[in-house]
Amino acid sequence: MVEQVGTIAQQRRRSAWLFLLPVLLTIAAVAGWPLARTIWFSLTDARLDDMAATSFIGLENYLFLARDPEWWVAVRNTLVFAGVSVTLETLLGIIIALVLNARMRGRGVLRAAMLIPWAIPTVVSAQMWGWMLHDQYGVINEMLLSIGLIAEPRAWTANYSTALAAVIAVDVWKTTPFMALLTLAALQLLPNELYEAAEIDGLGPVGQFFRITLPLIWPALMVAIIFRTLDALRVFDLMYVLTGNSRATASMSVYARQQLVDFQDVGYGSAAATGLFLVIAVVTALFITFGRVRLGAEPGR
């Protein structure tokens, strides 16, 4: 009997791999091959204007990248952008989801309106905010001047000290609805009986959130955070439209694009792109590990 169970399990595993094979081959063709080519180019001195003269140089591009201060500025900008924007989007998304999950009139209209910033293409919203933040005719300066918060118009995206904060603010405005939507979907699945029992036990709203709501929506919240972090780490269009190649906001993607396209250095640009891939892989692994620790068994079980 045990041998039959083992044989059935092996057959199921083989069947599962057979079903997964087309997907794995597709991923290898769509993602694996370009990644492998990028890694290969990073080990060469390939240039866009003379690809025929490409030769293998080993790890020289990576050694130069490690000594390039502009690369580390781009890494810092990307990590700060990802950390601050995802944190704010998560907190605001939870608050908005809790409000929209309450029973009230017009809840459906508010839910639909919430998705408008997220539905606008990033390039369009970035250009729109670029006009709004303009120092001469931007509506943001007009509003702040009218209420006395600033004494003179400011070039928010051109000033080194405010450019990154302006980009983060635009990203928070655009992507908070994504976090709110996924959080709201998780909240909708929670049984009301838990909250009724908590009220009988005298547990207040704050206690209900931290002892019931947050632990139950944590898996869905972790998925949302991981997806948003991946998006934030490879950000390009928002920063490039708002600030171009500015050192104050240059992300790793902007830096890699500048080397590949502006300087036509395929080898070095590929090394930067590979570095971006490694940073994303490490951060994703840390997030997944952190999520598993929080979702693990309780002590003593």
Image (cartoon, grey):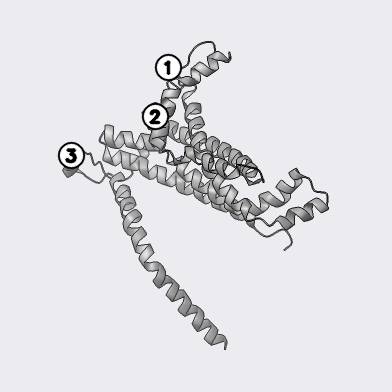
Name the residue at 54% across, 48% down.
224
Q: Amino acid at mark 1?
A: Tyr
The secondary structure type at the circle numbered 2 is helix
Mark 3 lies on residue: 50
Q: Amino acid at mark 2?
A: Gln
Q: Nearer the viewer, mark 2 or mark 3?
A: 2
Between disc 3 and disc 1, whose residue precedes? 3
The answer to the question of whether label 2 and label 3 lie on touching residues, with beta carbons closer than 8 A, is: no
The secondary structure type at the circle numbered 3 is loop
Q: Percent x, y for residue 9? A: 51, 79
| Residue toward you, 120 or 273 | 120
- Using the numbered discs, state the Cα–Cα distance from disc 2 to disc 3 in whole angstroms: 35 Å
Mark 2 lies on residue: 127
Mark 1 lies on residue: 137
Name the residue at 27% across, 37% down.
265
Name the residue at 40% across, 43% down.
275
In the displayed orientation, state which residue is furthest to the front. 105
Q: Quadrant of the N terminus?
A: bottom right
Q: Amino acid at mark 3?
A: Asp
Q: Quadrant of the C terminus?
A: bottom right
Sort mark 1 into few (<14), some (14-19) or many (20+) by Cα contacts within 10 Å.
few
Q: Percent x, y for residue 37? A: 29, 50
- Using the numbered discs, state the Cα–Cα distance from disc 3 to disc 1 in whole angstroms: 45 Å
Between disc 1 and disc 2, whose residue precedes? 2
| Residue toward you, 137 or 289 | 137
On screen, residue 9 above or below 103: below
Q: Is there any visible trace of residue 68 in the rendered image?
A: no
